[in-house]
Structure formats: structure tokens, C-alpha cells
Amino acid sequence: MYVSAVLDVLSSADGPPGLLPARQQMAMSLGWHIILACFGVAFPTMIYVVHRRGIVKDDPVALGLAKKWAKVSAVLFAIGAVSGTVLSFEMGLLWPGLMGRFGDVLGLPFAFEGLSFFIEAIFLGIYLYGWGRMPPRRHLMMLIPMATAGVVGTFCVVSVNAWMNQPTGFTLVPSTDGSPARVTDVNPWRAMFNDAVWLQFAHMWVGAFMLVGFVVAGVYAAGMLKGRRDAHHRLGFSVPFVFATIAALLQPVIGHVLGLQVGKAQPSKLAAFELATTTESPSPLRIGGLLVDGEVRWALDIPRLGSLIARNSFTKGVQGLDTIPPADRPPVNITHVAFQSMVGIGTLLALAVVVFWLARWRGHDLLGRRWFLRFAVVAGPLAVIALECGWIATEVGRQPWTVWEVLRTEDAASTSSGLWWSYAVAFVVYVGMTIGAFIVLRSMARRWRAGDEDLPAPYGPARSPAGETTSR
Amino acid sequence: MSLAVVVAIALFVGVLAYALFGGADFGSGFFDLTAGSAEEGAELRLLIDHSIGPVWEANHVWLIYVLVMWWTAFPGTFAAATTTLILPLALALLGIVLRGASFAFRKYAGSLAQARIFGAVFAGSSLITPFFLGAVAGAVASGRVPAEGNGPVLESWLHPTSLFGGAIAVGACAFLAGTFLTADAQRSGHDALAEKLRVRTLGVGVVTGVVVFAALLPIRDDARTLSDRLLGVATPLIVLSGIAGTAALVLLWRRRYSRARIGAVASVAAVILGWGVAQYPWILVDQVSIEDAAGARATLIGLLVVVALAAVIVLPALVYLFWLTQTEAWSTSDDGAPASSGRAVDG
């Protein structure tokens, strides 16, 4: 929800009546969906690891963990699937100006994503209902297509976003009568494999493992804080934490290379990231700070470091915002704060995992320390915030363009004035779904702790043929 | 046949698949809603959960396929339809969201009280969605979506063709679900339940059949282009639908449930195909033809690559899933005990 609150600041009186509610609704629904999408991408791999351990080492603890994670993933996948469907409707309901003109340019990766989603849904169905009904090893193998589809799906969806950042694969023919330029020479494959896609994909994919790894590990850290220090909790913590560790250490490297690319392709976005009002060579690294009346206030400048991080150079500067026409500048403060929050949290999490493994190498198990467990609990939400901030940075930083230097957001948005209603209903539904998911997941956890598995019949005590009511 | 028409057919195959597979899932919501109190409905609700649980996510993806094919192959008409039909589309979407979420929530609910609330939402929203999707189809088929989009928000779908479209969709879904559930109930040994479902499905089938043929009259005045072809080239399909539907009812009556399924599927498929044939060569009837709406040629070819890949990768997997749900092992309840006992032993 805070995504839309943040984007509220973007309010401007210009543009069609649908612009603001369209942007709000998209930010809310995408910001919500992306958390679940991460689970769809990263969770099957983690379940595979524990499930395989359960089978190969004949480890009942691991097997039990895999079973529980599978049930959690069933809930998350279901609401992820519907919130993903919301997004496909919204592409047309909110952004007809984008879909009507560029649908055939950007549509192909969506079609491949549909394909991979199909595979994921099919094998999830098989996997969930396969417990006790399939030979164990074949059952385990059902996770492989799911995990693979997660990778392909991430690539496809990110491909569309990368295309919006670095559009390619078509030609614009200016019209003479004042109507929008015509789109010709469409090459959907070129659009799909655009120059930005690989790095953006890597960033998102690794980000998904960071998010899920820290969130799931945090759940078991919370259990340990309450004194549940059994093998179940240790395994439940360590598997996702190992994934989170690798992801957290890879992410800064990928992010750095991606940043270099942004500087070349979208200088105004980089300028907003770095809060560079003018081009300084070399540029300082500006930590914190806000732009107030065109002046940078409350920033901590570290000389030269900005050039090194953003441009890989000791001398080259970050191109300043003053080189961008005012009408083409993104909302600087939101972009800058979101970007720095992402980087700050990412750095903190990377340091934390280094500390944990260094301590372990020296023979100290930090899982015995309450301060570390508390941090591990908080790391989950922090990873979620970092991911959301990353999306805010890249999306708000692209403004005022929906398709970089090709289509302005106000021309992409619906002209319908009824969109505030749609946004209001969507808001209520998403709050309801959040509460529903929370209640169900929490009561699942309680039931498991009490030793029960599921409700006898999902909807009420079933009557057995003998007539007596069974219950557990 | 032009490339655009081939892609349009591929798109329509998705519509058909969604109507049949997704439709059967949605229709089970009708039976869930009318199953009675928690205690007396438990057996039926358990059966529904068991029948659609493994497949509903996969069946749902057909909708995504249709949307993506539509906006990629015929982008302008997609924008025109979404801006004009924003209300029925948003309501259908609301139903999809509430239904999918509450179905999963119900399955894993913590208490009976929770399960009841989620179950009511699931069942109720299962009716909303087919109605509004049917209304959208009616609006498109009756030529009420202007090529430039932004048509009237209400008048575009508040008319006989759309309303009958919605009613037919709801009825067809319920009929499909009814025949499948009756067969499932018999197969898993719930004979009394099968008997109860048989009566209800017969009722639903008769009502739906009457609505389908009654709709031909108002559509005649309301949607000229459509009805000319419905009562022209598409007539064999309408007749086929009548015959197959009647056969399904007779087979249900005579308790030949697994054969009745074939009749039910054929009758619904024939109605949908009839609509498709009647709508040809338009994508938005009276407004934009398939030819004129098609996007870039390179993209259409790309889409056919996707369709070919789907045939190689997705179809076998889908067949495997459906095959599994029909096997002996999967006919037992979640806990390894026969589904008929309702007794639970952890397996």
C-alpha cells in the first residue's frame, strides 16, 4: 500500500482524468503482485532442495518441511495467479494508449510468459496433489519444470519492462496530420531480446531469491526466538538463508553493472538516482539528501566515489539534471530516495550474511544470539522493501515516459474518468486478499504447531458412510 | 487462409478451451452455492474440491492466453474493447480474483467458520465471472464496440445479446460442471450424491437449452450481422448443439454419466463454435475485420511459434495432469483413504 502512498506525491493536474488513478492502481497491483511472483520464482527451487534431502537422506524433518512449504506455496500461488490476471486485464483497462499502439511490439514475451505460467500451473497442480500418490522420485521431479518456468517467466515479464526502458524492434513514422507517429517495421524478437533485458532479468531474478530467502528464513528465526530450536526450525532457517546469502552477495555486483547501463541509456534516471543537479567531474557519492527548490539539502557527499560507482571511472561525472529539459525530468526525490533505500538495504543485508558466515567459520553460531535472530526476522521485510524500492526507482525514474522517449505516460493512460472507482474497488479487494492470506497462513501455522494437518473436510465435518461424523 | 485468420483461430481455440475447462470449474461454484448447510453440503463440497483442486490453476491460464494473444495479434481492438467494456470486464475480473483467492483460502482455512465465509465468496463469485465474460462476448458480437474505443460504458453491454450471452455462459458452465461432477460422484462411489446431482443437472440442462434457443429471437433484432450468420452458415452447429445437448440429457436421465459428459461438452463447444463462425470475418463485429485488426506480420509469425511450442510443451503436460486426475491413486482423498469414506489417515 505504501507504494501508492509514495506515488501519490506524483500527483499532477496535467494529463487525462485516467492518468492518476491508472498510475496508482498499477503501482498498487504490481507492487503487490511482485512479492508473490518472487515466491513463484524462487520457492520451488527451495522446496526442491528440502524435498530432495528428505528423499535421499530419508529425513522425515526435511520431508515434513517440504510438505508444509508446498501448502504455503499453494496459497501464495493461487493469489499470485489471480493478481497476475489482474495485471493482464489492467494492461488494457488502464493503458490502452500503450497496448493499442505497441501491443504487437511488446506482446511476444507476454505470450512466452503465458506458456511458462501454464507449465508452472500444471506442475504445481501435479505436485500439490501428488503427495502419497506418485513414486517419490517422480513426484520430486515435478518441481523441476516449475522452477524452470519461474526462470523463463521472470525473463519474459522483465523483458517487457526492459523494452519500456530501452525500446527497440520497431520504427516510428511521423505523421503529417498531427496524429501520433505510426509504428512500422516491427521485429518482436528484437524487442524481446532488447539491450537492457539480460541485466534487468538477472537483477530481478536474484532479487526474488533474496526476498524469499530472507522472508522464509525470518519466519523460522522468529520461531527460534520463541524457543523452538528443533531440527525443523534449523533446517527451515538454513536452506532459505543459504539461498539468500548467495543472492545478497551477487546482487550488488549485478546492480553495479546495471547502473552503468542506466547511465548510458537513461541519463535522467541516473541523475535522479544520484541526485546530480549539475554535471560534476568527478562526481561525489551523495548519500541521503532531498532536492528542495532546486537545491540539494541534507546530503552527505563523498568526493569521487560517485564517479567510481556510477561510471566505473575516477574522472567521468554523472550527467546532471540541468542537461535534461524540465518537462522530461522524472520526479527526482522519489526516485532518489527509493534508489538509495534499495542500495542501502541491499548493502546492509550483504554485510549481515558475511558477518554470519565469518562468525560461523570462526566457530560462533549466531543463531544462538537473540540480536542476530531479531535481525534475521527483520531482514525479510527489509528485503521486501528493497525490492519495492527498486521497482519504484526504475518505474518513477523512467517518467514522464511509459516507453522511453517514445510514449509519454499521459498518452498511454486511459481517458476514462471512472478509474477512481476501479482503483477504490481494487484497493478494497487487495486489502481483503492481504488480510485473507494473512489469516489463512497464520491459522495454518497454528494448526501445524498443534500437530494437526488440515481440516477434515475443507468445508465441514464430512459424514462417513456409516453415518458418524468424523473430525480430528 | 491468411496469417491473421490462422492466428485468430489459435486465439479462438483458447476461448473454446477456457469456456470448456474453465467453464466446468466456474460451474462447480453453482453447485457449491446450492449444496446446502455445512454438514449436508460437505460431501458435495469435498467432491468439488477434489475435482477442480488439481486443475483449476491450469484451466485458468487459458484466459491469460486469450488476453495475451488478443493484445499481441490485434492490439487496436483490444484497446477498443477494454476501454468500452471497462465495467463488465472489471466485474468479471473482480469475480476471478475473489474466486481464485477464496478457493485457496477455503482449502487451507483454519476453522469451519473461516471456511464458510471463503466458501460463500468462492461460490458467489463463480457465478459473476461467466456472466460478465458472456456479456462481453455479446457486446463484441453485436457490434457495440466502436473501432476507436471508448464506447458508451453502459449501453455497450446492457442489451439483449449481452444479457443473454451472460445467462448462456452461466448456464453452460453449470451444465458442464453438473455432468462432470455427477460422473465423478459415481466414479468415486458416492451414489446418493450422484443421484442428487443428476436431478439438478437435468434441471440446469433443460433451462440452459431453453435459454440458448430462446436467445435466437431477441438476437435477431438486436444483432443483425451476428444472427444472419447464426441462422446461416452456423446453423449446423446450432443444430448439433441441440442434438448433443438432448443426448446428454437423455444419457443423464438413463444414468450413463460418463457418456453424458461427451454430449455436454459437445453441446457447449458447438454453441461457442457457432458464435465464432457467426462472428467471422469480424473481430469487432460491424467495426473491424480480423484482417484489418492484425498487428505486424513478424509478430503474428512469432505468435504461431508460441502456439507450436505450446502444442509440444504444454499439451502433453496438460494431458498428463488430466490423466493423473482420472487414475486410481488420484481418486482417493487427500490423505490416502478412499474419497468415499471421508475418514482421514495421514499418508
Image: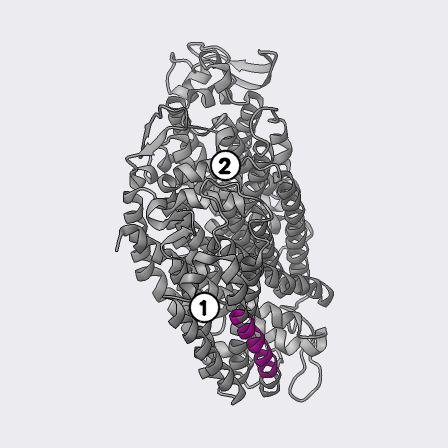
Q: Position of residue A443 (x, y in %)?
A: 68, 59
Look at the numbered disc 2 and give the secondary structure of its residue: helix
Check residue A354 in the rendering and tell me which mark sits there, or answer none: 2
Is there any visible trace of residue A95 in the rendered image? yes
The relative height of residue B47 versus residue A384 in the rendered view (above or below) is below
Q: Quadrant of residue A162?
A: top left
Which residue is tagged 1? Answer: B271
Q: On the picture, is B160 further left or further right than A58?
A: right
Q: Residue A452: x, y in percent?
A: 66, 68
Instruction: Give the residue furthest to the left.
Output: B1
Is B188 rendered above or below residue B33?
below
Which quadrant would the C terminus of chain A be assigned to in this image?
bottom right
Q: Chain of mark 1?
A: B
| Disc 2 from disc 1: Cα separation | 63 Å
Discs 2/1, front: 1
Amino acid type at circle 2 is Val
What residue appears at the point 55 percent right and 81 percent down from the top-left corner?
Answer: B185
Q: Is residue B115 above or below residue B155?
A: below
Q: Residue at x 62, y 40 (%)?
A: A418
Relative image position of residue A296 (x, y in whole percent): 58, 12
Taking the image as shown, residue A156 lies to the left or right of residue B184, namely: left
Spot occupied by residue A66 in the image (x, y as percentages of width and height)? 52, 61
Q: Residue A39 or B173: which is nearer the viewer? A: B173
**Neighbourhood count class around disc 1 (C-alpha, 10 Å): few under 14, some 14–19, many 20 upward:** many
Residue range of the region highlighted in magenta in the rendering: B197-213
Front position in the image: B71 or B54: B71
Instruction: From the image, give the main secondary structure of the stretch colored magenta.
Output: helix
Give, as a three-letter code, the residue at label 1: Val
Residue A241 sits inside the magenta stretch: no
One can see residue A62 in this view: no
Proximity of marks 2 and 1: CB atoms separated by less than 8 Å: no
